Image (spheres, grey):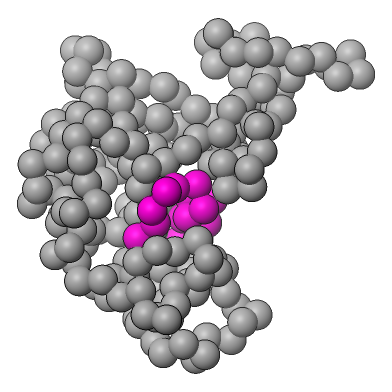
Amino acid sequence: MDKELDITEVGKFLKDGMTIGIGGFLGCGNAHNIIDEILKTDVKNLTLVATDTFFEAQGIGKLITEKRVSKLMASHIGTNKDTQKQVNEGFIELELVPQGTLAERLRSATAGLGGVLTQTGIGTFVQEGKTTISIDGKDYILEKPIYLDLAIVKAQIGDRAGNLVYHGATSNFNVPMAGAAKVTIAEVEELVENGEIDPHTIHTPFVYINHIIKA
């Protein structure tokens, strides 16, 4: 089994209006090379799911600066002035999602769950328009799964079957995103042969990965 893909082929998985999830946190664990490859295409009107948009014109922030994103689901936008400007101008529709909730909504999609119950956001704008369920006298928001058309993750090591190992904190949102998409592409720093990764060290198993890029 060999899922290796040439980075120049990324464009064939893109289409206007699709929902893309990109793992990472403030650039750490972002697939920077694949992001640059996306920008070589003319894809636009994307829904972007990510914990943040890094800084303007850097990494994932390039998608914002180049105005490829029309809707954003993220935990914060405070580090990217381009994101703030485009939201204020109405170019980007923003849904702020608490960080833990974002991870759990992605995990719910991976696990085939109908959603997750959380008290995070009770009594705030996060609760608006959502179903509230009371259990043992406590109110919880029903947060529904986030399904992705394409997930782009970054790992330190991957084998040709698609098993992945992350370095330190780079596992962050890469782990829950990998299984939430119709297609998942992994960018890896080191590509090894099948069987070379100790099974006990695998963070994302091959079943969630469709294609792998050595970049």
> Is residue 127 rendered to the left or right of residue 47?
right
> Residue drawn 55% across and 16% down?
126
The quadrant of the rendering that contains the N terminus is bottom left
> Is residue 56 rendered to the left or right of residue 100?
left
> Residue drawn 34% across and 37% down?
19
Residue 74 sits above or below residue 122 on the image: below
> Could one spot residue 181 in this view of the protein?
yes
Is residue 184 found inside the magenta-colored segment of the image? yes
In the rendered image, the residue lying farthest to the right is: 136
Q: How many marks?
A: 0
The quadrant of the rendering that contains the C terminus is bottom left
Q: Nearer the viewer, residue 68 or 148?
A: 148
Residue 135's quadrant in the figure? top right
Residue 87 pos. (x, y %)? 26, 18
Residue 90's quadrant in the figure? top left
Q: Nearer the viewer, residue 186 or 157?
A: 186
Residue 204 pos. (x, y %)? 54, 66
> Residue drawn 39% across and 87% down?
192
Q: Which residues are magenta?
A: 169-186
Residue 185 pos. (x, y %)? 35, 60
Q: Nearer the viewer, residue 147 or 157?
A: 147
Residue 44 sits above or below residue 207 on the image: above
In the rendered image, the residue lying farthest to the front is: 1
Residue 188 pos. (x, y %)? 34, 72
> Is residue 35 rendered to the left or right of residue 133?
left
Is residue 70 found inside the magenta-colored segment of the image? no
> Residue drawn 22% across and 46% down?
14
